[in-house]
Image (spheres, rainbow, N blue to C red):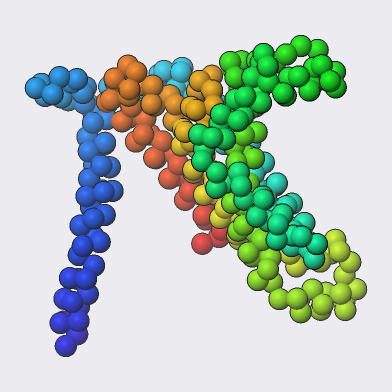
Amino acid sequence: MKQKEARLGYLLIAPSLILITLVILYPIVYNVTLSFQKVALNPRRENLFIGFDNYVTLLTDPSFWNSIWVTLIFTLGTVIGSTAVGILVALMLNQALKGRRIFRSVILLPYVAPIISLVFVWQYMFNPVYGMVNYSLVEQLGILGANVDWLDSPKAALGLVTLFDIWHLFPFTFMMVLAKLQSIDNSVYEAAEIDGANGWNKLRYVTIPEVTFVVGSLMILRFIWNFYKFDDVYLLTRQVPVVGVYTYELAFTTFNHGLAAAITVTLFVLVMAFVLFAVKKVLKW
C-alpha cells in the first residue's frame, strides 16, 4: 500500500519536476556550458571550446571590477535606504492615525505603478535643462549654484538611480513590516507598560525583536534582487554600469555571449556565497 502511495506521489509531482528541469535546470546547465566556449554568431558554425579563457579575461578586466564596485554601492545604498524608510513608515502607520487606510493605499502606488511610466516622470523631473528639480534647487531655493546633469553625469546618475530605487521599492518593506507589526499581540505591550516601560523601551525590547527576522529576510532578498538589477537603471540612465547593464552590453552590443555567460556564473557563485553567509549569521538557520 505504501509503495502504491509513493508511486502515486511521484506521478503527481512529475509534471512539476519536468517543468522545473526545462525552465530552470536546463538554462543553468546551458549557460555554464557557454561560459567555456567562444560562441559563434553564425548558427551554421559550432561553438569553440576555450576552457577557462572567458573567466581569465573576465577577472583581469578592469571594467568588470568597476561594475562590481558600482553595483555594491548601488545595492547597499538601496537596501539600507528602502529598508529604513519602509520600517519608519510602517511604524508611523501602525499607530491609530485618522485616515491611515488612505495613506497606506497611497504609499503603495510607487510599487504597483508600471516602471516605464515612473521612469518617464523621473526623467522629466530631473532633466538638466527644464526639470523641476534643478529649477527648484537652483533658481528657487538657491541650494545649488548651477544645474546638475542628473542623467548623464556618472556620479549624479548613481545617486539618482539609488534614490529612485529606494522610493520605488520601500513600499514592499513597508507592507511586510506592517503585517508583522499587526501580528504582535497588544497584551505584550500592556505587560511592558505594567513593568514601567516607556515608548522607547517598548520599541527596543518588544517591537525590534519581533520584526528582526522579517527585516533580515527582506534585506537578504533585496540584496539579491538589486545586485542583479537591470530594468530600472537601464531605463533611467545609461551612465551607471551596474553588473546587469554591463552583462547586457557584452551580450547584445558586442555579442560576446561566452563572456557574458561567464559573468552570470561568477555572479551566481558570489551571490550564493553571500546568501549562505547571511542565512547562517543573520537569520541563524
Q: Residue at x 20, y 57 (%)?
A: 18
Q: Position of residue 281 (x, y in %)?
A: 56, 54
Question: Among all residues in the image, which is located at the extreme top?
Answer: 146
Nearest the eye: 198 or 91:
91
Taking depth in this image into account, of 199 and 88 the one nearest to the observer is: 88
Task: Count the labels in the image.
Answer: 0
Give residue 47's position: percent from left, percent from top.
15, 24
Q: Seen in the image, is 149 located left or right of residue 274? A: right
Quick check: 141 left or right of 108?
Answer: right
**Which residue ends up furthest to the left in the rendered image?**
44
Q: Which quadrant of the figure has residue 184?
A: bottom right
Determine the residue positioned at 49% across, 28% down: 235
x and y percentages locating residue 280 in the rendered image: 52, 56
Point out the image quarter for the N terminus: bottom left
Q: Is residue 265 above or below residue 70?
A: below
Quick one: which residue is furthest to the bottom in this view?
1
User: Residue 94 at x, y = what percent?
Assistant: 74, 62
Residue at position x 72%, y 54% in the image: 103
Q: Between residues 271 and 281, which one lies in front from this camera angle?
A: 271
Q: Is residue 267 above or below residue 133?
A: below
**Taking the image as drawn, is residue 73 in sight?**
no
Q: Residue at x 75, y 76 (%)?
A: 186
